[in-house]
Amino acid sequence: MFGTLVPNDSAGSIIAQAPTHPLLSLPEDEIVRKLREMSLTEM
């Protein structure tokens, strides 16, 4: 999903790289949870 996503990236840096991503419409804790799921599946 995120070409720049690596396990060490913080959610803030990912969000900064994808300001128009649909995840931004979710509550922050939901964003972080989804990002963790994505990073786990990509590792």
Image: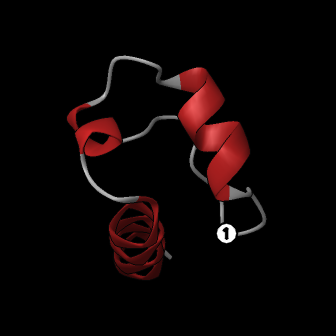
Q: Is residue 10 left or right of residue 4?
A: right
Q: Residue at x 57, y 49 (%)?
A: 5
**Around disc 1, counting alpha carbons within 10 Å, would you say few (fewer than 14), some (14 to 19), or many (20 or more)?**
few
Q: Is residue 15 above or below residue 43?
A: above
Q: Residue at x 35, y 79 (%)?
A: 37
Query: Outermost residue, top direction?
Result: 20
Q: Quadrant of residue 30?
A: bottom left
Q: Is residue 2 above or below residue 28?
A: above
Q: Is residue 28 above or below residue 38?
A: above
In what element is the residue under mark 1? Answer: loop
Q: Nearer the viewer, residue 34 or 25?
A: 25
Q: Residue at x 67, y 69 (%)?
A: 7
* Observer able to see residue 4: no
Q: Nearer the viewer, residue 36 or 40?
A: 36
Q: Quadrant of residue 8?
A: bottom right
Three-letter residue code for mark 1: Pro
* Observer able to see residue 25: yes
Q: Residue at x 39, y 60 (%)?
A: 31
Query: Outermost residue, front direction?
Result: 27
Q: Number of labelled discs?
A: 1
Q: Is residue 35 left or right of residue 13?
A: left
**Colour scheme of the rendered structure:** secondary structure
Residue 4, given in percent of the width and then of the height, sits at 59, 37
Residue 11, given in percent of the width and then of the height, sits at 63, 55
* Mark 1, residue position: 7
In the rendered image, the quadrant that contains the N terminus is top left
Q: Quadrant of residue 2?
A: top left
Q: Is residue 36 left or right of residue 15?
A: left
Residue 6, given in percent of the width and then of the height, sits at 65, 57
